[in-house]
């Protein structure tokens, strides 16, 4: 596998597309430090005795917090956590002067913690997580390996199992993948495009056969209103 090699974590049976879950966030608060009190949509994860929670809501509260370490023999493989989020998200959706506050200081801890000394625009794990998935099985980028991995090499993965998927019957997976000039592998889009293309081709063949076997007779243009008016004149 040629570098860069992308490390993904995959969650199964996790419905990030649930309406209440998706709405439980404050985009104004994520962008502007003066909007820290805009937490109405984040209930019940909106504040505590110390003030509003930044970032508030169920999406941020359930931040994925498993960690991975990779080893080639006894040598650790460096994992690059920079530039795993979209540049547009870092620039426009998460403020460079908005800092976490009162986060995960709740009766129940939903997931990972955040560094209160770093602005949200630099907390790329959070940014990746908060781009909610449309399907209950999804992958999100964890980091990158910037060295090649050779065939038949044994890679040891050490996983710190923090994220509780047992309560909702979910599963967790780790995937390594590379990408070429057209992107990474995605079976869903390939299958969907082939299916839609096949249906369109089938319908087109049926229309052609219908036209050949039972053509529709053309109308007489002399019955058109403007032709009748010209004849009367």
Image (cartoon, grey):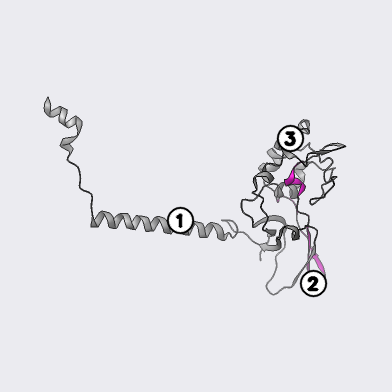
- Of helix, strand and loop, which one carries label 2? loop
**How far is the residue under mark 3 from the one under mark 1?**
42 Å
At x 80%, y 58%, the residue is: 162
Does the stretch in magenta take in 31?
A: no
Q: Point out which mark residue 196 bears.
A: 1
Give the image quarter of residue 67. Answer: bottom right
At x 15%, y 36%, the residue is: 222
Is disc 2 in contact with disc 3, using a CB cutoff of under 8 Å?
Answer: no
Q: Residues within 10 Å of mark 1 (few under 14, many from 20)?
A: few
**How far is the residue under mark 1 from the one under mark 2?**
47 Å
At x 38%, y 58%, the residue is: 202
Q: Earlier in the sequence, mark 1 or mark 2?
A: 2
24 vs 35, nearest the viewer: 24
Q: Point out which mark residue 173 bears.
A: none
Q: Position of residue 158 (x, y in %)?
A: 80, 66
Q: Disc 3 marks which residue? A: 40
Does the stretch in magenta take in 61?
A: yes
**Labels 1, 2: front one:** 1
Q: Residues within 10 Å of mark 2 (few under 14, many from 20)?
A: few
Q: Point out which mark residue 73 bears.
A: 2
């Amino acid at each position: 596998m040629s570098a860069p090699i992308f490390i993904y974590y995959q969650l199964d049976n996790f419905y990030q597309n649930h309406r209440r879950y998706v709405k439980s966030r404050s985009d104004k608060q994520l962008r502007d430090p003066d909007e820290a009190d805009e937490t109405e949509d984040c209930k019940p994860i909106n504040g505590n005795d110390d003030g509003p929670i930044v970032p508030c809501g169920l999406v941020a509260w359930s931040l994925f917090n498993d960690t991975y370490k990779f080893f080639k023999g006894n040598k650790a493989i460096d994992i690059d956590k920079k530039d795993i989020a979209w540049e547009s998200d870092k620039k426009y959706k998460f403020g460079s002067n908005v800092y976490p506050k009162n986060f995960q200081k709740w009766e129940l801890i939903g997931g990972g913690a955040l560094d209160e000394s770093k602005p949200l625009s630099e907390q790329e794990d959070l940014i990746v997580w908060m781009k909610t998935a449309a399907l209950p099985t999804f992958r999100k980028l964890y980091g990158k390996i910037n060295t090649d991995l050779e065939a038949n090499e044994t890679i040891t993965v050490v996983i710190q199992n923090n994220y509780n998927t047992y309560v909702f019957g979910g599963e967790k997976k780790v995937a390594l993948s590379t990408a070429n000039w057209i992107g990474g592998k995605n079976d869903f889009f390939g299958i969907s495009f082939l299916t839609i293309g096949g249906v369109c081709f089938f319908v087109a063949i049926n229309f052609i056969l219908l036209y050949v076997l039972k053509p529709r007779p053309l109308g007489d243009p002399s019955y058109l209103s403007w032709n009748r008016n010209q004849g009367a004149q």
